[in-house]
Image (cartoon, helix red, strand yellow):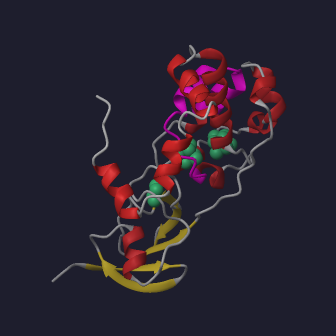
């Protein structure tokens, strides 16, 4: 007999196999996921969820696609969290502390509670990358936030209203543009694209059937 557990999706009780993830358990329970699902393997950040185990006061966070169900789990998904991305032209900025002060001044309201770090399904030291941003250490902020999947779970928990993934994104963009050496092969490829060198290949691809595209993908040349 398969082991079953009782879980609650949006407050409604379901019995689901204990071996399932939150995502597959939702599908087992009959939900068709059109939001809050993407890669299904912990990379895209689309499936953030919040849960609490019955009888425990701690509010937990995780990705629905990688977190297993547990007995007494009360779950809600947060497929979209309204983070606050400021508008800027990266060409007008400089990689220094002033840019963070101007675009994301709320980072200086951090109270050091570490709730963001505890919430991160990627186990990033989120509080630390915000601290690097405060100091204007763009490179370290970029490196520390490098594996951020933009799920927004940290921002859900932040009492200071900080949009951490957007701060990390700005740092990585500044790092890529102004601090790391230019990737010449990328510049060259962008020029080739802008010169239309791939237009006919793209048109050919768009004209193919799904099966032909799958075949091309499965037999593609993989760079060593
Ligand atoms: S830093 Fe925040 S947005 Fe990025 S992966 Fe962690 S919780 Fe998600
Ligand atoms: S949750 Fe917000 S206030 Fe708390 S440490 Fe993280 S950034 Fe600072
Ligand atoms: S579906 Fe992409 S991270 Fe879960």
Residue 213 position in % (x across, y down): 38, 56
Quadrant including the N terminus: bottom left
Q: Is residue 126 visible?
A: yes
| Residue farthest toward the left in the current orientation of the protein | 1
On screen, residue 19 versus residue 36, left or right, reads left
| Residue farthest toward the right in the current orientation of the protein | 102
On screen, residue 180 versus residue 73, left or right, reads right
Queried whether the magenta region covers residue 135, the answer comes back as yes
Residue 132 position in % (x across, y down): 64, 25
On screen, residue 79 versus residue 6, left or right, reads right
Quadrant including the C terminus: top left
Residue occupying image coordinates x 56% and y 13%: 181
Queried whether the magenta region covers residue 99, the answer comes back as no
Q: Is residue 72 visible?
A: no
Q: Nearer the viewer, residue 1 or 138?
A: 138
Residue 109 position in % (x across, y down): 77, 38
Number of marks in picture = 0
Residue occupying image coordinates x 81% and y 22%: 98
Ligand 2 occupies quarter: top right
Residue 191 position in % (x across, y down): 61, 26
Q: Is residue 122 above or below residue 81?
A: above
Q: Is residue 101 above or below residue 118?
A: above
Q: Nearer the viewer, residue 2 or 224?
A: 224
Magenta range = 128-153
Q: Is residue 161 above or below residue 71?
A: above
Please tell me whether the stretch drawn in magenta is mainly helix, strand or loop. helix
Residue occupying image coordinates x 46% and y 51%: 205
């Amino acid at each position: 007999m398969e082991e079953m557990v009782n879980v609650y999706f949006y407050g409604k009780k379901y019995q689901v196999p204990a071996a399932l993830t939150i995502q597959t358990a939702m599908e087992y329970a009959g939900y068709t996921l059109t939001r809050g699902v993407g890669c299904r393997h912990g990379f895209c950040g689309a499936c953030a969820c919040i849960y609490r185990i019955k009888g425990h006061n701690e509010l937990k966070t995780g990705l629905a696609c990688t977190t297993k169900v547990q007995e007494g789990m009360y779950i809600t998904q947060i497929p979209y969290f309204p983070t606050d991305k400021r508008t800027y032209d990266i060409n007008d900025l400089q990689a220094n502390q002033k840019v963070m002060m101007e675009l994301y001044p709320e980072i200086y309201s951090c109270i050091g509670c570490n709730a963001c770090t505890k919430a991160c399904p990627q186990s990033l030291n989120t509080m630390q990358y915000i601290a690097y941003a405060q100091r204007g250490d763009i490179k370290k902020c970029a490196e520390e936030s490098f594996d951020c999947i933009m799920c927004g779970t940290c921002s859900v928990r932040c009492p200071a209203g900080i949009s951490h993934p957007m701060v990390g994104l700005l740092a990585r963009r500044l790092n890529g543009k102004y601090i790391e050496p230019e990737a010449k092969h990328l510049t060259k490829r962008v020029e080739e694209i802008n010169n239309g060198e791939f237009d006919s290949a793209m048109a050919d691809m768009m004209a193919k059937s799904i099966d032909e595209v799958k075949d091309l993908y499965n037999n593609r040349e993989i760079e060593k």
